[in-house]
Image (cartoon, coloured by chain):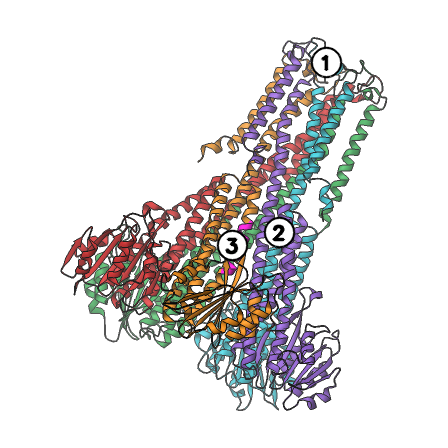
Chain colours: A purple, B cyan, C green, D red, E orange
């Protein structure tokens, strides 16, 4: 049934943190009760309600009622596989962002934000986020965040989320550089597996970054009454960052592809090298062994002058060795002329 | 001839189920007769006529006459290879969706829907669909479906169809994960065939999902009088789902491609490994065998001092073994220095 | 010189067939003379002039004069490599379509159509087309074709041309399915050549189908006075068909690509298999042969106790065989542990 | 410094040819002097000034002054690596085209054209162009070129330039066909190099053709007062040709890619074939040789009954041969069962 | 915190150079103090302030205050990884370009420009730029630069930046040509590494060139009051250059890809060649050696007439040699017929 809010039973229980602030006021209520929320929506103040943990559908429904959320929005909050998006509703804007955290790899956490005229409502999946510096700025009145409305706060949160992608991506950049050096030095099978993992992870990051760009662009372009001009200028900066992120992701993906080619060609060069060694050794010694085998045949020279008279020649043995040396020399000359030996080194 | 309705003779015969409902009324007529349909179209009620089985062109033509369908639409109903689409006509909207069912793999079934002011007409190919929960909600008056018009019912059906793709896709996601693990552990030829099947199936799903997105978008955007604002908000949610589906399909396809690369490079690494073993063994023993063959030649030492005098040396045999050991040792040193032996293990 | 009409001297001579029809009248003139054409253009009737064979520039020029064609259009008629297109002129619409015929593979024939207010003029390259059912419908007054104007007739012809692609494409679909089964069962070199031919043919079909879509779309969108609303609704159906065709072509192309990957990986798996057999046999027997060769050396045991005393040991021969068995056993154990033998079968 | 005209010192010196024509007049001045140009600009006549050779910056500057060219345009004339483009200026349109000549391969020559109200100014790099038929038509008053203005002449030149690409492309089409036949018959390394050259050349042609399309489209779309309606209809024909050229180039590029795949798979099939032959021969004879070596060992049967008693058996030798035959037969049976021998032929 | 200016402590300290010029005046102040800047903004003059080195946040902030820069702009100046872009602000346009220098490879340096009504403010990362010719033109009043405003100066700087890419790209063009020749002559493993480096560098250049195109296009299209019509005409020329650069980059990338294919196919051809040599030699001599081994067996002819009677035949040895010659001849004939020997040379 559409619009049904069903919590994942394994999700942590919600904790509500409410922050009310204005240019000169700041009030923080950790572990807030739902009943108190309505009272906190002040005239000239901004209320930021941050709900962490989505394990209780009832709590989410009640908060939704207080701030006038649509039932489909409530469903989106608990279905934590939403793509980043910005949707306008009558009395608020609904923004979904996906947050990466340094210690969780490419796994992203959904952050649902509802920006109204005087409030910002955020829902996070788990404890732990990248908003601590913003909370500090609110507490100590640093920067412009207390002067401006919930739209600027939304910008600050989105900016923090986007900035969180940079260190993750840098990690992959370094991994690719390392792989590059290793592949060029010596291609190994396990590099390929690491490369595959890097490519899959970059694909995941791209899935998160692409719609983030559209989301930010939607906020800038949609002329919503809940996003003011000042915040819009700052969001334009955010937009530049998402473009840059995408640019980096795509570049890394292309380098990975080129690296795969380098790996495969390196492998094929090594196979050629191995086969060359085998071929040189085998083609030189197989004819020699054959000659030796011929002289090892047991035909009885006593019954016929045709039966291996060379075994009794005065210079039979030196002559046989000379033949072998000639064959070996001829083959070596042939290999050298084809560039399979020695000559190769002189080239570069 | 365009607009001709020719049924597939193997298709099952049509069964008509009519449901008439309003906020407070509910009437269901299983195995309904065509003659009764016209009478059921009530003033303030919504009529949902569900035709299952397309084996009788006459029945489809008569129903089409009752609800004013164009002859091209009738043709589209029985030609069950239509792409999902939404087309507006004067007195109804024609929607084609493609339904997947859990037990039929990637094979899709065409569902043709005609949404009028007070009716919804659906045609399915075969018995068995994913609409049972919606019928239950209608029967028991759960949710908003009885309060709203045929447009909301259409949304509910489309939503059910789209939701049906998720478990199918999850199945492929798991198949890819399994393949990934297997390929990284040990590449085998039959994995390649499974991968090919997965890729082809994903291609089929993509062919169904892409136009579904356009279809839903068409319904949202086309300002049709038969799709109300409330249903449009819900369809926006549907649209998000189709985007998400496409996103998943494309991601799976890219992972499959990367997996193919991983497979091929793994194969090439194994070939290198195999050839290395052969080359090491062969290049060590072939020269040794040659030396042994030389000493196995039957030149007669009695006719000439030049004929293999070493066979009669006091330390002839130990000396020959020493030469062999020296050759083997030299080659082993060469292989180790090139990193073909032992050294390889120390790396990772 | 632009606008010059130069016929290919090898092209067949033109034959003119004129059909004049209205709701109640039908008149057919096979092998019509040019002089009679003007007289046939009736007030309330539709005239369809079908010219088959482009071998006489003079005939084409004279017909062009009668119906007011631009000299560039005349040039396009005889230059039979035009892409499908729809161009509007002052008193007619110029449509180029490319017809496939079941017995000519992917070779397409250009059909030039000129749709005026009361006439349709068509030029074909050769005898033989897919318009016979339409001529029959005109003759016997079946369907709506006699009730409606030249625009509907144009639609009917375009629809017939587009429908002609389906059986051709199905043929390629079956060829791909067969190839798929064969490649998975056993990759052979000649499959690759067939796959290459299929890919090239699909490329040719795509070149014909893509611009057909644009052509039909142009007719629908261009608000031309020569294409009425009724025909436009039918062309919308045509448009759906071209989209479907493109969809099928693209899908077949992607499956072909995936099939190539499957083929190459199958080849590489077989090479691995072959090399494994060679490596196992060679690496087992080469050391054994070496050992046997050593005992085949002819050092003279009588001159020195160091010269091959083992040849005179009581258990010398069994001991040698035991050494060989041990070497062979060790190597077999090594191969089995690396998964090159036996173990492979247990996997799937 | 932008707008600086610096001639390449190696470029040939400019030769000016001026042609003044009207419906009834024609005047040609080969090796014209700059001073005479201004005087030739007649009231009702069209003046075509064709400058061949860009070796003298001063000449170009002076001509530019006479016809009112911008300094950036002058710079573009001598920088002969411009992409085809059409730019509108206040009193003329600036068109750059790239001409191919049959005897110069894919090397293109820049033709800069300036179309004014009553003049056409063209600059070519070198002697030799594809405009001779147009000059003849002007001289003999054939066709419409003398009736119409400089815009039609421009069209005629552009048309000639575009038509020049067809024979070049056909040459590559034939090269690809030849390669296709050769690769399918027998893949050789030098085919690959030819294919690489074809691909690179097609890339060069594509670089010239793509912007030509945009250039022609710009002329049609830009509503410039210097391009009349009649010329615009003809340019539409030109536009179709550029589309067709691009279509052919892209098709050839795709066939080349498919050909590369065919080549690589053919190579890999041949490697398999070669390895199969080696493996069959080696794995059959290596065990046989081993058996023979065993019986060639020199253990002394006189010192022990354990030392090679089989050498003295009555049927020892036939028995040994029988063992060898059994081993060989077993291996042959194994290879045949795996499809490595004989069976392969029966398949197709 | 957004809008915070944090300098990289390793960045060089800023040096300010101010140039004030008008049609008839020119004043240059190297190593200018910040306090003097405000005084230099003259009524009818243009002031170009060039700051080189971003190591002191305070200096940048103070200059920003003087010219009214937004705090986000200040942040962008010191975060030197911005993509090229043009953003309009109320009283200036903010342009970011990325400069390449001949001696720094593909490493780009950020140049931030702020174009106001009567000033141009530029920030560079390090000493050394490509603006010296422009400074000279300003000093000596050459060209139009002194006649026109800061917009033309901006154009001149952007033009110099774009022109700087040409020699870099030409270097890569030559590297690719060299690689092409080498790969076709003889594929070597280290070529692959160079190709990989070229591809990665081209990717970097593309990342810089693509957004430059958008930046220039933005300046042309955005109807900003700070960019006059004259400068706009010149910027159109710049735009053509960026298109050309992109065209070259893309072409080089495609040639690189084709080169990779050529390399891989060359490698595979060589492997085939190597394996053919090995196979020919091995398959000829292995059976011969086997025959010789058979005749080297030590069965005792004295105990049985079945034991190797051929050793005592009168023509035993010549007969054995004849058998060997026949086997070798047969195999040579087989190889020649398969085209593995000799025949190959006759082909091209």
Dot 2: element: helix
Instruction: Determine whether, in the image, residue E60 is placed left or right of residue A57.
Output: left
Viewer-nearest of discs 2 and 1 = 2
Q: Which residue is mark 1?
A: B309
Whether B117 is drawn above or below C44: the answer is below
Q: Distance of mark 3 from mark 2, alpha carbons?
A: 16 Å
Q: Are marks 2 and 1 on the same chain?
A: no
- Label 2 crowd (10 A; few <14 / some 14-19 / many >=20): many
**Spatial separation of the CA atoms under disc 3 and disc 1:** 69 Å
Check if mark 3's residue and mark 1's residue have beta carbons within 8 Å: no
Q: Is residue E315 left or right of residue B122?
A: right
Which quadrant, please, contains the C terminus of chain E?
top left
Is E348 colored magenta in this rendering?
no
- Residue E198 colored magenta? yes
- Residue E321 x/y as whole percent: 61, 18
Q: In the depicted view, which residue is nearer to us: B131 or D195?
A: D195
For the magenta stretch, what is the residue range?
A: E196-208
Residue C25's disc number:
none
Report the residue marked by disc 3. Answer: E202
Residue D98 visible in rendering: yes
The answer to whether residue E163 is left or right of residue D294 is left
The chain to which mark 2 is attached is: A
Give the residue at x 47% y 32%.
E345
Task: Report the chain holding disc 3.
Answer: E
Q: CA distance from mark 2 to mark 1?
A: 59 Å
Give the labeled residue for mark 2. A180
**In this picture, is A330 found above or below C237?**
above
> Mark 3 packing: few (<14 Cα in 10 Å), some, or many (20+)?
many
> Of E345 and D63, which appears nearest the observer?
D63
């Amino acid at each position: 049934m559409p619009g049904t809010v069903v919590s994942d039973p394994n999700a942590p229980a919600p904790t509500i943190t409410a922050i009310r602030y204005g240019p000169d006021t700041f009030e923080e209520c950790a572990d807030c009760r739902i009943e108190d929320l309505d009272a906190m929506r002040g005239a000239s103040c901004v209320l930021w309600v941050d709900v962490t943990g989505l394990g209780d559908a009832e709590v989410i429904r009640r908060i939704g009622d207080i701030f006038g959320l649509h039932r489909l929005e409530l469903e989106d909050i608990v279905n934590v596989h939403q793509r980043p998006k910005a949707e306008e509703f009558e009395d608020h804007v609904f923004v979904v962002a996906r947050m990466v955290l340094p210690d969780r790899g490419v796994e992203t956490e959904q952050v649902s934000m509802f920006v109204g005229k005087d409030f910002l409502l955020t829902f996070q999946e788990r404890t732990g986020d990248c908003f601590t510096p913003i909370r500090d700025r609110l507490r100590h009145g640093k920067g412009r965040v207390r002067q401006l409305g919930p739209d600027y706060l939304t910008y600050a949160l989105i900016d923090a989320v986007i900035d969180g992608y940079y260190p993750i991506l840098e990690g992959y950049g370094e991994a690719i550089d390392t792989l590059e050096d290793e592949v060029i030095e010596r291609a190994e099978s396990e590099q390929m597996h690491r490369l595959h993992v890097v490519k899959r992870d970059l694909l995941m990051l791209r899935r998160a970054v692409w719609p983030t760009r559209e989301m930010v662009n939607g906020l800038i372009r949609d002329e919503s009454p809940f996003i003011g001009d000042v915040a819009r200028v700052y969001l334009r900066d955010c937009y530049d960052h998402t473009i840059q992120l995408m640019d980096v992701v795509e570049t890394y993906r292309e380098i990975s592809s080129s690296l795969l080619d380098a790996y495969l060609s390196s492998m094929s060069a090594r196979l050629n090298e191995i086969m060359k060694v085998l071929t040189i050794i085998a083609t030189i010694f197989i004819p020699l062994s054959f000659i030796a085998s011929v002289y090892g045949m047991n035909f009885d020279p006593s019954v016929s002058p045709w039966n291996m008279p060379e075994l009794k020649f005065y210079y039979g043995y030196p002559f046989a060795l000379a033949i072998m040396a000639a064959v070996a020399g001829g083959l070596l000359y042939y290999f050298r002329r084809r560039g399979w030996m020695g000559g190769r080194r002189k080239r570069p």
